[in-house]
Image (cartoon, rainbow, N blue to C red):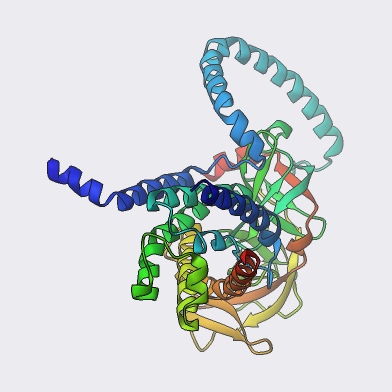
Amino acid sequence: MQQIIDFIIRKKDVVVYFILLLLSVVLILNSNYFQKSKVLLLSNSISNYTTENLNYFKEYFKLKEINYKLTEENLVLKNQFEKINRITVLDSLPITNFSYKNAKVISNNLSSIKNHLIINKGLKHGLKNEMGVISSTGIVGIINRTSKNYSSVMSILNINTKINAKVKRTSHFGTLEWHGLRTNYMILNDIPETANIKIGDSIITGGMSLIFPEGINIGIVSEIINQNKHNDTIVKFIADNKNNKAKYLDLKFKENYLTIEVKLHTNMNNLNNVYVIESLNREEFQKIKN
Amino acid sequence: MVSIYLLILKRFIFLVLIQGLIFNNFDFFDIYDPYVCIVFIITFPIKVNKITFMIISFIFGFVLDLYTNTLGINAAACLSIAFLRSYILSFVFGSFYDPHGIKLIKNYVLESTFSQKFLYISSIILIHHLTLFSLETFSLEFISLVIIKTVINSLISLIFCTTFIYIMIKNEK
């Protein structure tokens, strides 16, 4: 025991280093709530935490009453909705409905590998996770965290983003990804080789996932990366001949599928007003999908 | 001793503000930001106890994190270079380095060869960027992306940091 204590005293700076490192790793893993306003985070978080927890507890006793009220309200709203639906939709099969909300970008970052935007609306305004965000020129990202007044949007310039997209002319579906080095180009995968794609074709959202409605502009095909020579391999480095700059790293090619470079319409540098898309049939879709 | 802490506080506030408000929005070639904040750790007085140094660096990184909304990433990177700085100093400067801090950082900069200065500053910047970007991605899948970002970003940071340190030392005289 004495030896252990001696050891700790001798190596106290190493011990302090690892304690603090552990603390920072815990912070990284737990930074899910993610608030823009630092003042709010610092001053209100402790008091909010206690009152919030107390409220959770209190709410359980009121559940029955709230439930009753909600069903009543639901009934009224449902009736109203049906009425409106009957007027507007002439088709016998109801189409998927989307509603739009506007928001402003208050912080935008491009320098990271996993870029995020912050917009000035949150839970209070009815925003939830996995809602799509678009600008007037094209798609911007998907909401991944919401707090009371702000939401964080996972930008399309994020290596984890995968967006369902299709070629407008031929209606082939593919997956859109970012490769981390250039901010106005993305890569469209999973388009079969037989598809007759040409440079200049429009790429639009596919509408498969109910995050984005079908037909929102994304960009145009700027290059079809030739892959016949390296089927099913990983290409380490493709260089831009004009500027001598690295374009892609670790591009994975699948056999019989094309890899297409897409030039985005949206300039992610100067976003200001964006629209959040809420899908109204979302839960129903999820239920039938699983 | 009090005046040293006053100096540290002054640099702390100045560098946090200049990094958080100006240099985080620089965006060279769209995706590279210079990290001038490392100057705080490079020029931290050697006289101060190592544990205090690490705790102050951790807080410094944490405050920077509040600006970028990435809790803990900058803190871990700053903490790591604070921990490794004494080893780097003794490795680079050899017998010229004294751990009790009678010599100031100014002496190290003025009385050493070019390669020593370069090695000291660039190794600290490289370690900082490597921890920063690898913690940011948090997976081995994008390792080549992390490495190329580290190298390019280090070059940009190196230019800015050396300029900054020279301006600071010129003004201290």
| Relative depth, front residue between B111 and A284 | B111
| Relative depth, front residue between B27 and B101 | B101
Q: Position of residue A89 (x, y in %)?
A: 82, 39
Decide if residue B145 is in sight here: no
| Relative depth, front residue between A4 and A25 | A4
Q: Position of residue A37 (x, y in %)?
A: 67, 40
Q: Position of residue A196 (x, y in %)?
A: 68, 79
Q: Is residue A43 above or below residue B85?
A: above
* Residue drawn at the location 84% of the way across and 41% of the way down: A90
Query: Which residue of the protein is positioned furthest toward the right in this rendering?
Result: A87
* Residue drawn at the location 44% of the way across and 61% of the way down: B81
| Relative depth, front residue between A81 and A165 | A165
Q: Is residue A50 left or right of residue A127?
A: left
Q: Is residue B71 above or below residue B168?
A: above
Q: Quadrant of the N terminus of chain A?
A: top left
Q: In terms of image quadrants, where is residue B21?
A: bottom right
Q: Is residue B52 above or below residue A75?
A: below
Q: Is residue A216 left or right of residue B43?
A: right
